[in-house]
């Protein structure tokens, strides 16, 4: 888990670094407010008649949340969707359309799934449209912004690699002495007068 989390945050850091600091001159002398950020969320909750047969109904609505960042040279998008996972093919379909219609380079788009086990399966074409809509809406809300980064710790996760002495093999289980990453990494976006726009964070834990 620690390796996966590190790779994800490293990739995110590189993407943000590339769009904010195009050159040393830009980084030092760029005008205040050059960075713009917009955020939006779109409800992706299926209709009652689209829920799985074993469902008890809708407790909380699920969403596609998007943050779009623009430094007047290029754009990037961070998207999180309340689904179990997203395939490479689905990412490709969505990001190609975003690049064509909105102008955000495909390689500057990160789409992640919250990996919820409580969300219903949506038709790919419906989900793709709603994810696209969240990015489009966030783009329409771009405004001058500030960005900040911080980190903290949380102790609710646990190492899940445990050695079974009877079977002489590894399996998933509570390993209280194993290593796990407790870091909560946070990126905050605020308006120029310090009002919140969005917060993006991650934590190494199975949902």
Image: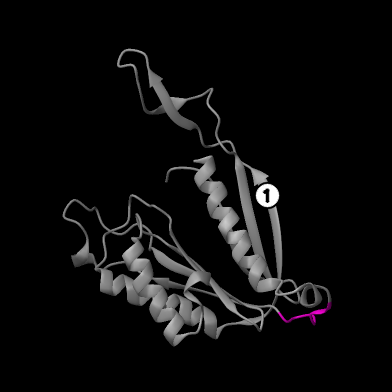
Q: Is residue 40 above or below residue 55?
A: below
Vertical position of residue 189 compared to residue 140: above or below: above
> Residue 47: where, in percent of width, then height?
25, 69
Helix, strand or loop at disc 1?
strand
The stretch drawn in magenta includes residue 170:
no
Q: Label 1: which residue?
A: 151
Extreme residue toward the top, this view: 166
Main secondary-structure element of the magenta-colored stretch: loop
Q: Residues within 10 Å of mark 1 (few under 14, many from 20)?
A: few
> Which residue is more in the foreground, 11 or 117?
11
In front: 84, or 193? 84
Give the percent coordinates (x, y) of residue 133.
41, 79
The residue that appears at 32% across and 66% down in the rendered structure is 89
Q: How many marks?
A: 1
Residue 62 shows in this picture: yes
Residue lying at 38% horizontally and 63% vertically, measured from the top left: 61
Q: Is residue 126 left or right of residue 159?
A: left
Which quadrant of the figure has residue 180? top right
Can residue 195 be seen by looking at this rendering? no
Seen as rendered, the residue at the extreme right is 29
Which residue is drawn at the image coordinates 34% and 54% (left, top)? 84
């Amino acid at each position: 888990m620690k390796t996966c989390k590190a790779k994800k945050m490293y990739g995110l850091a590189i993407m943000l670094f590339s769009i904010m600091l195009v050159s040393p001159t830009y980084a030092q002398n760029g005008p205040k407010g050059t960075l713009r950020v917009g955020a939006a969320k779109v409800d992706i909750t299926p209709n009652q008649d689209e829920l799985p047969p074993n469902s008890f109904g809708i407790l909380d609505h699920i969403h596609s949340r998007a943050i779009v960042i623009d430094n007047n040279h290029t754009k990037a998008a961070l998207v999180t969707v309340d689904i179990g996972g997203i395939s490479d093919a689905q990412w490709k379909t969505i990001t190609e359309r975003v690049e064509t219609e909105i102008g955000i380079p495909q390689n500057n788009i990160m789409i992640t799934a919250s990996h919820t086990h409580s969300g219903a399966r949506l038709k790919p074409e419906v989900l793709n449209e709603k994810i696209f809509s969240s990015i489009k809406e966030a783009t329409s809300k771009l405004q001058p912004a500030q960005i900040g980064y911080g980190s903290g710790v949380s102790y609710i996760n646990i190492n899940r690699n445990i050695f079974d002495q009877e079977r002489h093999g590894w399996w998933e289980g509570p390993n209280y002495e194993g290593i796990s990453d407790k870091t909560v990494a946070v990126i905050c976006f605020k308006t120029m007068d310090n009002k919140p726009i969005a917060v993006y964070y991650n934590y190494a834990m199975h949902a």
